[in-house]
Image (cartoon, rainbow, N blue to C red):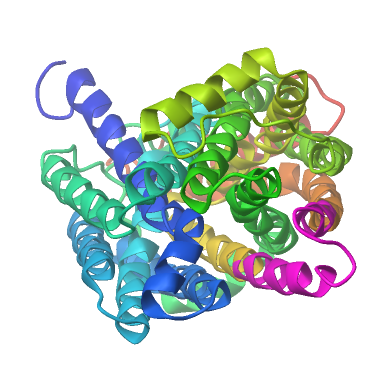
Amino acid sequence: MMGRGGIVHRVYSVVVFVILASLDNVAIGIVPPLYGSIGDDFGVGEGHIALATTIMFLISAVAAIGWAYAGDRTDRKPVLTIGTLIWVAGTAWSGLATGYPTFLLAQVVAAVGLGAVASVSFSVVSDLITPKRRGLVMSFWGLSQGLGTLAGTLVGGILGHTDWRAPFLVTAAAGLVATVLYLFTYNVPRGESQPELAGVEYDERIHHDHLPIILGRRTNVWLILQGGTAQIAFGSLVWLPVLFRARAEDQGYSAGTAVLVGSAFATIFQLGAALSILGGLAGDRLQRRTPRGRALVAAVGVLAAVPFYVVLFFVPMTITVPDGASTGAVIRGVLENVVTEPTVATCLGIAVFALMLTSANSPNWFAMISDVNPPEHRGTVYSLGNLVNGVGRAGGNALVAVAFQRLSGAFPPPLNYAVGLASFQFFFIPTGIMYWLASRTVAGDMAATHAVLLTKASEMSPDGHVGGDPAVVAEGLTAQQDPGAIR
């Protein structure tokens, strides 16, 4: 199995998809640490640059629907290639912009291309993964996006603290290399990993009149809507570098050193997202006992994290790094603080645990979309969820900026940032409730989707018989997926 489509080719393909998913988040993550630097260069305030990020979130989410529909209708490989080249061009142009209007337009171009990467690659990756491993593998795919955001924060702070343009140009170059690598990936047949479709050449495509069918699956409605409130909270977290920068400035550090400190601390404190793998494993394990498993793991995770986030933003930190020193010396100082400063270690512990809990959301959300939808609908459902995510994230990013400004009258920096960020974490509560509601409908939607796939497989099979009678199999699945049953 070493040839085209063999195990080596598949592993290579998954790795490239992970890199692509990571890089598109790097392109978004490099901007927040540089709000001040870019604004100073263009003669505008931080709010103007934050607006560019907000617009980027929104346009990327809207564009994703068109890209996803095209991917579900046609060959996904050229769609993803074109989208990647567009965001690479927009990111490079952002780094070469000579004024704010040009920078804003370049970010819009990049956002249009970014919409293709997540939605289309999600559809492809879901066809590479068998149902029983979806939570685990999707956790790696989702983790790559989180790590991409972290890498963007770090790259923005390290490469951009003296020249804000460098991170954009480096990221664009990396995206170009990834595009070349993608050309050699395995062109995955639609529905290849679905057990019901084994031995069948499945060639179903989405049609414009399928939207009522998609929204008729109640689980899809909750999976799409939950992102609105979740991403308001997550969107506010892009201001973490600003909070830590303000703490450094409050302790007397110069602006350049404070930017480095803010980016480094924000990166370290978000490492808990790497533990999303545990959320994926927990979802897979509980899913074998009850079809509510993935939804319940996500619900408990986001609800339990809220108090830890609130505490995190108010725990005092004592920062000791060499002011005005080189990048390497400041980063080493930050890392030493994790070991030598109890306040920093406490903050790190709380942050890692909080992010571990909320990160259970991502892999189980990905897996549930695949569980309750046929292959030709997955990219579009993901993009609809991503649109709501984008609106929520843009809203969180914009509203928290307004909150910081309003709060600054009563609370001087960095306290205004702490109060603002803490208040926005309560948006995770309705998210947890919607996951619980999804857990009540997922069994029936899974059974219905299995029945549809079995029926189509029977119709496509040369002998008209695949995997047993569809009605009988669907009835058995429904019985097995009673919320209290052991699978």
Q: Main secondary structure of the magenta part?
A: helix
Say whether residue 412 is magenta. yes
> With 78 as the anchor, is 36 left or right in this view?
right
Image point (43%, 46%), residue name:
157
Q: Residue at x 35, y 86 (%)?
A: 101
Percent of width and height locating residue 415? 82, 54
With respect to residue 253, does 285 lie above or below?
above
* Residue 467 visible within the image: no
The image shows residue 269 at horizontal and vertical percentages of 62, 32
Q: Quadrant of the C terminus?
A: top right
Quarter of the image for the N terminus: give it: top left
| Residue 177 position (above or below residue 283) | below
Q: Position of residue 291 (x, y in %)?
A: 73, 33
Say which quarter of the image contains residue 283. top right
Query: For the magenta stretch, what is the residue range?
Result: 394-422
Relative to the observer, which residue lies in front, 302 or 295?
302
